[in-house]
Image (cartoon, rainbow, N blue to C red):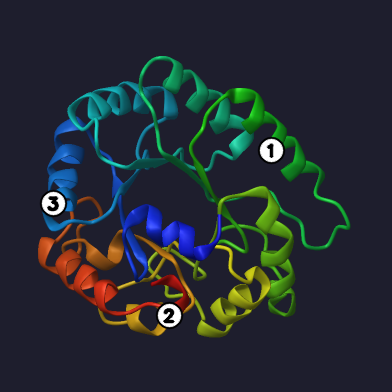
């Protein structure tokens, strides 16, 4: 998938905004999804920040039953694709289709001539039968530090292993360095790129030409609230992304 196809899929000329909801329970998640749907964001990611995956699965089933038409991605906290893809395949077989998986760590190693672990994950993904979109974390927060001189190379070698290469700033809520993002764009060419930290309505414009998807939580949540979207902040970000975007994306 190239950038143009990605934007056509979501009907978004600028960066696709997918709010990230740190799930507490079904009621809280649904209340936040309602904001996302009402304001016209293209989709949502759900993450089990406060409890294990086994407790998350019934919640996902219930949310999918309530919201059958919402584009829904998930992040199983700290779990790579080799763990997630078999679970996602079972969920799909049970009638709970998850549209995307975001892994914080796609298990790339820019220091090596071959990507043995990423290749193994790709084989597990294929065997799972799951047909969703894979957002893979590369040079991502809380992972092994990567020499900035290798950012473009890291993005380039990751491209064959995932649908959307996904990077971040140095920590949750921290904006990514714009030089890093320019390096990633250079390495990816016309492949999609996502940022998963630090995007706000105030800084999003400086990333809009190079980035295709904003996975955003802190930047659109109520001040001091880790769990709940501020509709006004989400609306402001959506307004901006509907205005901005690289010409190639339109």
- In the picture of the structure, the residue carrying the numbered disc 1 is 122
Q: Nearer the viewer, residue 108 or 159?
A: 159
Mark 2 and mark 1 lie on one chain; the one further toward the N terminus is: 1
Q: Nearer the viewer, residue 11 or 211?
A: 11
User: Residue drawn 47% across and 75% down?
Assistant: 248
Mark 2 and mark 3 lie on one chain; the one further toward the N terminus is: 3
Kindly tell me whether residue 53 is visible in this rendering. Answer: yes
170 vs 10: above or below: below
Assign a secondary structure to mark 2.
helix
Residue 116 position, x and y percent, is 82, 43
To which quarter of the image does residue 126 belong? top right
CB atoms of marks 1 and 3 within 8 Å: no
- Compared across the picture, whether 194 is left or right of 189 comes to left
The label on residue 247 is 2
Q: Residues within 10 Å of mark 3 (few under 14, many from 20)?
A: some
Marks 2 and 3, how far apart at CA: 29 Å
Q: Residues within 10 Å of mark 1 (few under 14, many from 20)?
A: some
Q: Which callout, 2 or 1, points to the residue nearer the camera?
A: 2
Marks 2 and 1, how far apart at CA: 32 Å
Residue 114 position, x and y percent, is 86, 52
The label on residue 233 is none
Assign a secondary structure to mark 3.
helix
Kindly tell me whether residue 141 is visible in this rendering. Answer: no
Residue 26 position, x and y percent, is 20, 31
- Compared across the picture, whether 164 is left or right of 186 comes to left
In the rendered image, the residue lying farthest to the top is: 94
């Amino acid at each position: 998938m190239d950038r143009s196809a990605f934007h056509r899929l979501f009907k978004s000329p600028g960066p696709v905004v997918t709010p990230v909801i740190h799930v507490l329970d079904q009621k809280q998640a649904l209340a936040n999804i309602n904001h996302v749907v009402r304001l016209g964001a293209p989709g949502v990611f759900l993450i089990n920040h406060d409890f294990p995956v086994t407790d998350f699965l019934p919640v996902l089933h219930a949310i999918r039953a309530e919201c059958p038409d919402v584009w829904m991605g998930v992040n199983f906290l700290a779990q790579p694709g080799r763990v997630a893809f078999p679970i996602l395949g079972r969920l799909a077989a049970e009638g709970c289709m998850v549209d995307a998986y975001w892994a914080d760590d796609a298990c790339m190693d820019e220091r090596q001539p071959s990507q043995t672990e990423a290749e193994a994950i790709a084989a597990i993904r294929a065997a799972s039968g799951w047909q969703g979109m894979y957002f893979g974390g590369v040079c991502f927060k809380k992972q092994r530090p990567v020499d900035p001189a290798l950012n473009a190379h890291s993005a380039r070698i990751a491209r064959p292993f995932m649908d959307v290469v996904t990077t971040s700033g140095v920590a949750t809520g921290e904006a990514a360095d714009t030089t890093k993002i320019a390096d990633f764009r250079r390495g990816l060419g016309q492949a999609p790129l996502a940022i998963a930290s630090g995007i706000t309505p105030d800084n999003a414009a400086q990333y809009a030409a190079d980035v295709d998807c904003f996975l955003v939580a802190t930047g659109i949540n109520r001040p001091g609230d880790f769990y709940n979207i501020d509709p006004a902040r989400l609306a402001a970000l959506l307004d901006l992304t509907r205005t901005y975007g690289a010409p190639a994306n339109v």
